[in-house]
Image (spheres, helix red, strand yellow):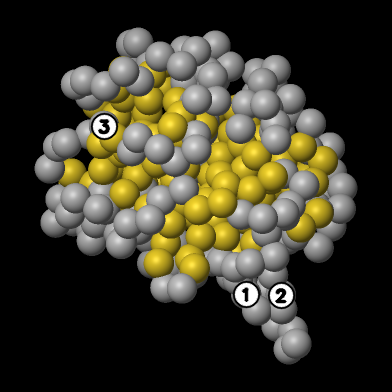
């Protein structure tokens, strides 16, 4: 098999990245750090001490006390995108790594302290999004036979199980804290909307109904609230979640109901691709962006 001579590179992101948190009750925003380059998708560690983010293919741990960032050693997995998910016990991280052999995304797992990655999904492309609370299963979006659906697979690898079977993009699967449900987003009704199903794929129910494109539902650790990112209708194609757009982070009860806009920002791709709730469910971490002036 032919190997790529150059790794995948991020293009078209001439931005300053602003790592922030927001208080879910008050809406008060706090800037933690600014980076003169692209960072994306902060995960909050369970001990509340670090934010895990990706930048140019690598993962980093941002110390919330000192403000320092340290690279997480990941062996050959140096082309990771913003799909990283922490294991329930925070000992490992699963990533979507674009392999050098064909440039396709596959899912790997390695120690959060650093270590050699282990392949989970030989089939590609596979884009990680969820890790079951009992630690046994990963949920992901995958293209198979020209359709993007949601699949689950044991963390040690094995046979994947297809959970959605509708035309159009089904993406962003994430388990509820009790493991009973998987939340996801789907274009099956025309616009991208948030959906919920049982963990086995049954009883798929639409949860948002507004005239927007809603992506990447993330459930708070207490199970009470769901956050997601919203693009304006007409600003993007329903099946696209690009960078450099005016977007909102919205929250809604996990039982369903009216949403509330938590943050308005310039961002999109990279802002909250992963679950970025604080362990006590009081805050969310996210990345906003500022375009650099052309020289």
Residue 113 in the image: state x and y as whole percent: 84, 37
**Residue 103's disc number:** 1
- Using the rendered view, name the quadrant where residue 99 is placed: bottom right
Pointer 3 local density, CA inside 10 Å: few below 14, some 14–19, many at least 20: many
Which residue was labeled with disc 2? 100
Q: Residues within 10 Å of mark 1 (few under 14, many from 20)?
A: some
Q: Is residue 254 left or right of residue 78?
A: left
Whether 15 is drawn above or below 172: the answer is: below
Q: Nearer the viewer, residue 1 or 167?
A: 167
Q: For label 2, count other residues whose C-alpha is less than 10 Å away and answer few (under 14), some (14-19) or many (20+).
A: some
**Contact, mark 2 vs mark 1 (Cβ under 8 Å):** yes
Residue 230, how many percent across, how many down?
Answer: 27, 41
Q: Is residue 125 above or below residue 274?
A: below
Q: Earlier in the sequence, mark 2 or mark 3?
A: 2
Give the left or right position of residue 197, taking residue 90 as reference: left
Which residue is most to the bottom?
A: 2
Residue name at image x 26 percent, y 53 percent = 187
Residue at x-position 86% and y-position 53%: 116
The residue tagged 3 is 207
For mark 2, give the secondary structure. loop
The numbered mark, 1 or 3, whose residue comes first in the sequence reads: 1
| Vertical order, 53 against 188 (above or below) | above
User: Could you tell me residue 295's position as x and y percent?
Assistant: 42, 69
The residues tagged by marks 2 and 3 sit, at their Cα atoms, a distance apart of 38 Å
Q: CA distance from mark 2 to mark 1?
A: 5 Å
**The N terminus: image quadrant:** bottom right
Q: Is residue 179 visible?
A: yes
Per the model, the C-alpha gap separating discs 1 and 3 is 34 Å
Residue found 76% across the figure and 37% down from its top: 92
Q: Is residue 67 visible?
A: no
User: In the orientation shown, which residue stands out farthest toward the right?
Assistant: 115
Q: Secondary structure at mark 3?
A: loop
């Amino acid at each position: 098999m032919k190997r790529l001579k150059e790794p995948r590179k991020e293009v078209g992101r001439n931005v300053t990245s602003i790592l922030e948190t927001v208080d879910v009750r008050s809406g008060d925003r706090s800037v933690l750090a600014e980076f003169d380059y692209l960072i994306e998708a902060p995960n909050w560690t369970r001990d509340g001490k670090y934010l895990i983010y990706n930048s140019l293919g690598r993962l980093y741990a941002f110390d919330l006390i000192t403000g320092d960032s340290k690279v997480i050693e990941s062996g050959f997995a140096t082309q990771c995108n913003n799909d990283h998910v922490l294991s329930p016990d925070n000992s490992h991280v699963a990533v979507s790594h674009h392999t050098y052999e064909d440039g396709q995304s596959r899912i790997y797992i390695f120690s959060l302290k650093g270590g050699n990655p282990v392949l989970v999904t030989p089939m590609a492309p596979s884009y990680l999004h969820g890790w079951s609370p009992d630690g046994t299963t990963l949920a992901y979006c995958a293209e198979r036979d020209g359709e993007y659906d949601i699949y689950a697979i044991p963390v040690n690898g094995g046979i994947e199980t297809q959970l959605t079977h509708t035309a159009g993009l089904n993406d962003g699967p994430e388990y509820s804290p009790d493991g009973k449900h998987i939340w996801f987003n789907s274009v099956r009704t025309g616009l991208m909307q948030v959906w919920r199903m049982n963990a086995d794929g049954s009883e798929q129910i639409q949860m948002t109904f507004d005239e927007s494109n809603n992506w990447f539902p993330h459930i708070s650790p207490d199970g009470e609230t769901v956050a997601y990112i919203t693009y304006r209708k007409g600003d993007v194609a329903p099946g696209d979640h690009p960078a450099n757009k005016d977007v909102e982070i919205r929250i809604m009860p996990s039982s369903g109901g009216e949403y509330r806009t938590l943050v308005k920002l310039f961002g999109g791709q990279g802002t909250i691709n992963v679950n970025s709730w604080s362990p006590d469910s009081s805050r969310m971490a996210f990345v906003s962006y500022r375009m650099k002036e052309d020289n």
